[in-house]
């Protein structure tokens, strides 16, 4: 799961960058940037929880 979380984080980053490049109006750009940041946060949460779970097993 840690690897999945680490792979999701760049996806959120690229979603935010693509929104900035592709959208000219502010509302859709802000919505996609916010969703990209949330995807990054979800990826970070999954990676941290998987890391903490692995530490507890040892």
Image (spheres, grey):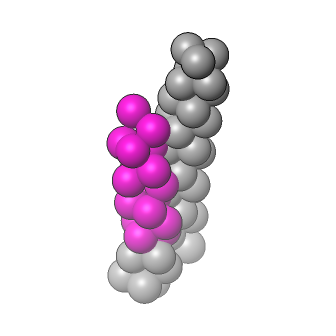
Residue depicted at 54% across the width and 24% down the height: 54
> As rendered, which of 23 and 4 lies closer to the eye?
4
Residue depicted at 41% across the width and 70% down the height: 14
Residue 11 in which image quadrant: bottom left
Specify the quadrant that holds the N terminus. top left
Q: Is residue 13 left or right of residue 51?
A: left
Residue 53 percent across, percent down from the top left: 56, 20
**Residue 49 in the image: above or below residue 30:** above
Residue 46 percent across, percent down from the top left: 51, 34
Residue 49 percent across, percent down from the top left: 58, 27
Residue 39 part of the magenta-drawn span: no
How many numbered marks have been drawn onto this rendered protein structure?
0
User: Which residues lie in the magenta part?
Assistant: 1-16
**Residue 14 in the image: above or below residue 51:** below
Specify the quadrant that holds the C terminus. top right
Residue 34 in which image quadrant: bottom right
Residue depicted at 62% across the width and 24% down the height: 55
């Amino acid at each position: 799961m840690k690897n999945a979380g680490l792979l999701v984080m760049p996806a959120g980053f690229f979603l935010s960058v693509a929104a900035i490049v592709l959208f000219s109006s502010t509302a859709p750009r802000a919505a996609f940037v916010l969703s990209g940041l949330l995807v990054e946060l979800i990826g970070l949460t999954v990676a941290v929880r998987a890391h903490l779970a692995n530490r507890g097993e040892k």
